[in-house]
Amino acid sequence: MTLLDVTTWQGTLHSDGWVEPAGGTAPVRSPATGEEIGQVGVANAEDVTRACARAAAAQRAWAATGYAERAAVLRRAGQLFEQHAAEIGDWIVRESGSIPPKAGVETDTAAQECYEAAALASHPLGEIIPSAQPRLSLARRLPVGVVGVIAPFNFPLILATRSVAPALALGNAVVLKPDPRTAVCGGVSIARVFEEAGLPDGLLHVLPGGVEVGEALVADPNVRVISFTGSTAAGRKVGEAAARHLKRAHLELGGNSALIVLDDADLDLAVSAGAWGSFLHQGQICMTTGRHLVHESLSERYVERLAEKANHLPVGDPAKEQVALGPIIDERQRDKVHALVTASVDAGARLAAGGTYEGLFYRPTVLTDVTPATPAYAQEVFGPVAPVITFSDQDEAVRLARQTEYGLSLGILGRDVMRAMALADRIPSGIVHINDQTVSDEAVAPFGGVGASGTGSRFGGPAANVEAFTETQWLTVQGAITRYPF
């Protein structure tokens, strides 16, 4: 069975199936070649209003459905992600410019998210609490109702599914707005999986669209929780808008993550980890290693070997050849990356490797002679750029690592693990990996950052998911009506 039949894309998924979108249709293009590889419906605010109303109407019956039935739908969805991994993965490669191994991680993780969510359906959702009166007193968790999910282009399947799956498992309906640049692999594929998995009508609406759709989703009165993954600038606007409407917004935002290479680190392994952390998926990952902090005793050799590795990494169309890096998602993002690299060189940094591009293919880039003010070091690049700065002692490493508004992920490399853990205690970060680079995620682990990286761990693991997609209700029960003095 083919899951993604092109004839089904000419609409948005509503409770009565694929319907004509109010916003028309748009071509789906490969960033590697620019060719049109399909078409997809584009939603507008009218679609959002209609979808949210239908979602709210359908959600009540779903919340009343037994956990075993909800869990079965989620398990079936996980199986479908596995069964159709090659087909969905091919779209991730062509539509988002991913290399096949990265696409494989996405399909595998999407399946795991569904399996974890299936277990979440039967997770304890409350506690008995003491009361000063003779009654049973409970704090119980109930579905919020309708969850709005706004997902980005870089890991389109994972970053949508990690909210869609647990929200559905806990009895909610979902309205998903995927990035229009990855509407198939980050939207249509999820809709089709849950459609085939037997999810009842009206519970999942997929509305590809732009800013107008996101604004309407945040403002719609039927939506009680917004789950947003994207840039810090956009996240601030989402958070502000949600606050005006007195609804919760879970924000997973940008990062400028540091990799600290201590003086006792294995140099070859450190270089390999640093290259992976900076160049995986062209650096278009919130957890990307954006700052390499290397002890002065290793820095010269580290830069030399990292540059050598960068110079030998093949860049090209991942759908046609075996490459390490594919294309940047579009010209706007490529130009932003190149502007930061150029500004860094103009400010005194030296190009040890890269700094050039052909079309949307940007060479992996290594910058040395970097200071904390160097643009590509101080700002989130979201491209394959590795700025290297040196430190002389642990206090300086901590000071440099803390010198950012972000706090998403941190990597510390060194043989003395206890020393690394002591350093981690001094650096605010939602995620810390000792003896690994900064890019890592698992469906069972809480995920989120601090500072400008977001509002904390809002995904992954039962505790974070229950907190994200349910409300707390205090309920008391007693055998007779209380007698009052009046």
Image (cartoon, rainbow, N blue to C red):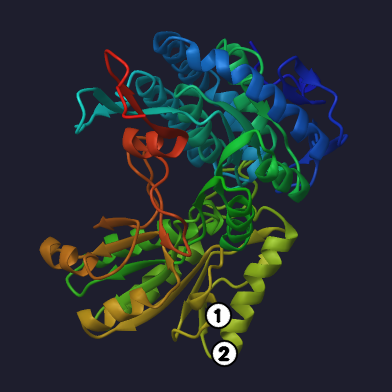
Q: Position of residue 166 (x, y in %)?
A: 45, 29
Helix or strand or loop: what does disc 2 sit on?
Answer: loop
Compared with 303, 47 (above or below) is above
Left/right placement of residue 131 relative to residue 276 reads left
**Residue 365 visible from this viewpoint:** yes
* Pointer 1 residue: 375
Q: Position of residue 202 (x, y in %)?
A: 66, 18
Residue type for callout 1: Pro
Residue type for callout 2: Ala
Residue 347 circle label: 2
Q: Quadrant of residue 138?
A: top left
Helix or strand or loop: what does disc 1 sit on?
Answer: helix
Taking the view exactly as shown, the residue that stands out farthest to the front is 486
Q: Quadrant of residue 262?
A: bottom left
Compared with 177, 380 (above or below) is below
Viewer-proximal residue, 137 or 78? 137
Viewer-proximal residue, 130 or 372? 130
Left/right placement of residue 356 relative to residue 212 reads left
Residue appearing at x 69%, y 39% in the figure: 220
Contact? badges 1 and 2 (CB < 8 Å): yes
Residue appearing at x 40%, y 53% in the figure: 456
